[in-house]
Image: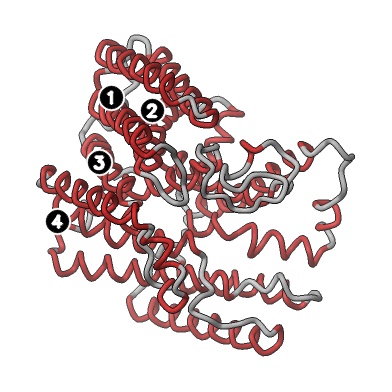
């Protein structure tokens, strides 16, 4: 079955946001350019701040993409039986969990001198034998994996000796670590409910009840404060399933359409697709502005109107989207009702409104991207789509290439002087543009790898 290009593009967009938001100028941009709860200039975490910015969208969008991809990948493996499927899910979980440690332990950029940067690049290259997709005989594949284990182990031990880098279970990349557990739970839930949507809905509401029972007592931050267990126990594994489980429903729909003889072309024959897409865009922009400014009552009223217009326009002009736009509207309104009950929306501590609204936005973005894909044959648009879809189809590589390859390469070659050159005071957007170009360059490298059929997989 062909890949779903729009999902790769959406995943690429979220990866761009993750890397870009981490390297933009610190403390000098408007608050909406950072995590809302880490406002400038100090960026001190303030859990009492309500609202979300575009930065707060990138992680839930990635979770949504992971959830939507589970049925697409899983349907190719269900014929192998329950035992084989469960074993493969746990293998993928362990490899993703391992990756969350390795890319951190193999990054020596904080140490002084040129040698740590060289070791970091070597560590990046050593990940290829472990995670690259290999289409060879089983024995050859095992030998390559063993060589990867040996190279990675040697580099980590040498880094610990030479650069005093700590080897610890607490040194993991929190985002990949969290995604590993979400994948594990999500893939198993999908498999055992793939033919029973009602059962999946029941599990969703059980998780919602668990959320409602634990959040008022601050169990998540209390447990996370216990150092001895925080490396493995985090209630957000379950909270963020409120994003991933609805995403598997969208993935089911997409998988069936992709597998059909006519393929997935919902815009084909549509009367006024631009009207629907524009309404999706207006809804997203309105939500971001209203949530940023705390317009609770006005937001609910306007969102009801926008949701009704979306459903009516989809029904009339692009009926193929009714199945996915309806849950987007329902989740949006559910999120706004939750916001009225909770009184605030935030990523940390995670709120139900945050999960519901970001899932709705993810679905609407997917509709918009479906429309944009029609213009892939236009030179400039086609190039951008190739970069983002190529990077989006290779997420593990995309996520670490800037920090573990591009940055140490610039340090070794002296290009870091150009990258970090001071800009005139009062012009921080020069730094934003520079960061944007750096991320696009990084994603282009990964997209080139993808076009050469070189993929990292857990």
Tag 1 and tag 2, C-beta contact below 8 Å: yes
Residue pointed to by mark 4 = 192
> Distance from label 4 to label 3 (Cα)?
17 Å
- Does dot 3 land on a helix, a strand or a loop? helix
Measure the alpha-carbon separation of dots 2 and 4.
28 Å
State the SS at label 1: helix
> Residue at the spot x=61%, y=29% of the render?
380
- Mark 3 or mark 1, earlier in chain: 3
Q: Which quarter of the rendering shows the N terminus?
A: top left
Q: Is residue 96 visible?
A: no
- Which one is earlier in the sequence, the residue at label 2 or at label 4? 4
Q: Position of residue 258 (x, y in %)?
A: 27, 37
Instruction: Rate crowding at label 4 as few (under 14), some (14 to 19) or many (20 or more) other CA atoms within 10 Å.
Output: few
- Which residue occupies the foreground of this view, 375 or 323? 323
Which quadrant does the C terminus fall into? bottom left
How crowded pointer 3 is (Cα within 10 Å; few <14, some 14-19, many 20+) is rated as: many
Residue tagged 1? 321
Can you say whether 449 is above or below 159 in the image?
above
Q: CA distance from mark 3 to mark 2?
A: 15 Å
Q: Residues within 10 Å of mark 1 (few under 14, many from 20)?
A: some
Badge 4 or badge 3: first in the primary sequence = 4
428 left or right of 154 in image: right
Frontmost residue, 327 versus 356: 356
Hey, which quadrant is residue 321 in on the image? Answer: top left
Q: Upstream in the sequence, badge 1 or badge 2?
A: 1
Which residue is denoted by mark 3 in the rendering? 255
Q: CA distance from mark 4 to mark 1?
A: 26 Å
**Residue 241 in the figure: left or right of residue 446:** left
**Residue behind mark 2:** 367
């Amino acid at each position: 079955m062909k890949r779903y290009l729009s999902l790769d593009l959406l995943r690429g967009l979220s990866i761009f946001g993750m890397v870009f938001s981490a390297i933009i100028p610190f403390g000098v941009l408007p608050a909406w350019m950072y995590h809302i709860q880490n406002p400038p200039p100090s960026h001190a975490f303030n859990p009492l701040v309500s609202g979300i910015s575009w930065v707060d969208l990138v992680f839930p969008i990635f979770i949504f993409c992971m959830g939507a991809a589970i049925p697409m990948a899983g349907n190719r493996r269900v014929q192998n039986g329950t035992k084989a499927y469960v074993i493969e899910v746990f293998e993928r979980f362990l490899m993703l969990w391992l990756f969350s440690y390795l890319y951190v332990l193999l990054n020596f950029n904080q140490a002084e001198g040129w040698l740590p940067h060289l070791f970091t690049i070597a560590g990046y290259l050593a990940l290829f034998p472990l995670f690259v997709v290999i289409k060879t005989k089983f024995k050859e594949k095992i030998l390559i994996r063993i060589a990867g284990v040996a190279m990675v182990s040697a580099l980590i031990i040498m880094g610990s000796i030479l650069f005093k880098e700590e080897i610890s279970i607490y040194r993991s990349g929190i985002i990949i670590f969290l995604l590993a557990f979400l994948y594990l739970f999500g893939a198993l839930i999908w498999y055992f409910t793939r033919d029973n949507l009602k059962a999946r809905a029941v599990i969703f509401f059980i998780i919602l009840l668990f959320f409602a029972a634990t959040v008022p007592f601050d169990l998540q931050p209390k447990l996370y404060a216990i150092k001895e267990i925080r490396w493995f126990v985090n209630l957000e594994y379950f909270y963020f399933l409120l994003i991933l489980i609805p995403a598997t429903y969208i993935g089911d729909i997409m998988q069936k359409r992709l597998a059909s003889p006519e393929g997935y072309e919902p815009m084909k024959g549509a009367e006024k697709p631009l009207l629907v897409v524009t309404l999706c865009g207006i809804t997203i922009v309105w939500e971001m502005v209203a949530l940023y400014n705390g317009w609770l009552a006005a937001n609910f009223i306007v969102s009801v109107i926008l949701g009704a217009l979306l459903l009516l326009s989809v029904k009339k002009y692009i009926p193929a989207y009714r199945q996915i736009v309806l849950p987007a509207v329902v989740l949006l309104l559910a999120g706004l009702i939750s916001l009225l009950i909770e009184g605030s929306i935030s990523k940390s501590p995670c709120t139900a409104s945050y999960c519901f609204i970001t899932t709705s936005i993810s679905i609407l973005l997917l509709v918009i991207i479906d429309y944009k894909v029609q213009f892939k044959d236009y030179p400039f648009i086609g190039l951008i789509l190739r970069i983002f879809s190529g990077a989006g189809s290779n997420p593990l590589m995309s996520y670490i290439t800037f920090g573990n390859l591009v940055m140490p390469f610039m340090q070794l070659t002296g290009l870091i002087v150009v990258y970090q050159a001071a800009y005139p005071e009062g012009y921080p957007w020069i730094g934003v543009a520079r960061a944007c170009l750096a991320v696009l360059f990084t994603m282009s490298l990964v997209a080139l790898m993808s076009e050469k059929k070189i993929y990292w997989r857990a």
